[in-house]
Image (tube, grey):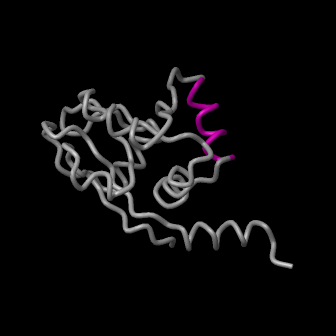
Amino acid sequence: MVKPVLMLLLSLALNAEEWALVIRADSPLDSLSAAQIRDVYLGKIRYVRDVRLFPLQLGAEDPLRQQFEGETLKLSRAALREWWIRRHYLGQRPPKVVGSAEAVLAYVQQVEGAVGYIPYAMAVDANVTVLHYEAGTSQ
């Protein structure tokens, strides 16, 4: 019998999706490194080149969020929960949860400095700037 954890990892690898981190089209930012994205989503930095960033994330059970957390943040759900519990006592809050990729896209298009990850296919024809693109391969 295959262990459930191994099955989950295999499932994530097979179902890995291309995603893009997006910001409003009129933003002066044109790219973010993986390290900068990680720091923004962990609350370590709030500004990049004088642009105040407001990270958005999908719901906890969304497969794209699980992929993003594992591949980009490189933290388990339990480790992230512990991280934000500690940060709470420093007066920080985790990224705003948005109900769907469509809602992330709409929020980003309307709110200056909002950044969020969405399926890459949604970003192609949208009026946004792609700051980072991931092909969706597990490491």
Residue 61 screen position, x and y as percent: 62, 46
Residue 18: name its quadrant. Answer: bottom left
Q: Residue furthest right?
A: 1
Residue closest to the eye, 59 or 82: 59
Residue closest to the eye, 132 or 58: 58
Name the quadrant of the N terminus. Answer: bottom right
Q: Is residue 1 left or right of residue 100?
A: right
Residue closest to the eye, 76 or 88: 76
Indicate yes or no whether the magenta region holds residue 41.
Answer: no
Residue 124 screen position, x and y as percent: 24, 56
Residue 35 screen position, x and y as percent: 37, 54
The residue segment tinted magenta is 78-88
Indicate yes or no whether the magenta region holds residue 82.
Answer: yes
Q: Residue at x 42, y 36 (%)?
A: 56
Q: Is residue 80 left or right of residue 5?
A: left
Residue 13: name its quadrant. Answer: bottom right
Q: Residue at x 51, y 26 (%)?
A: 93
Q: Is residue 129 left or right of residue 103?
A: left
Q: Residue at x 31, y 60 (%)?
A: 133
For the stretch drawn in magenta, the main secondary structure is: helix
Residue 64 screen position, x and y as percent: 50, 54
Relative to 65, is 67 above or below? Answer: below
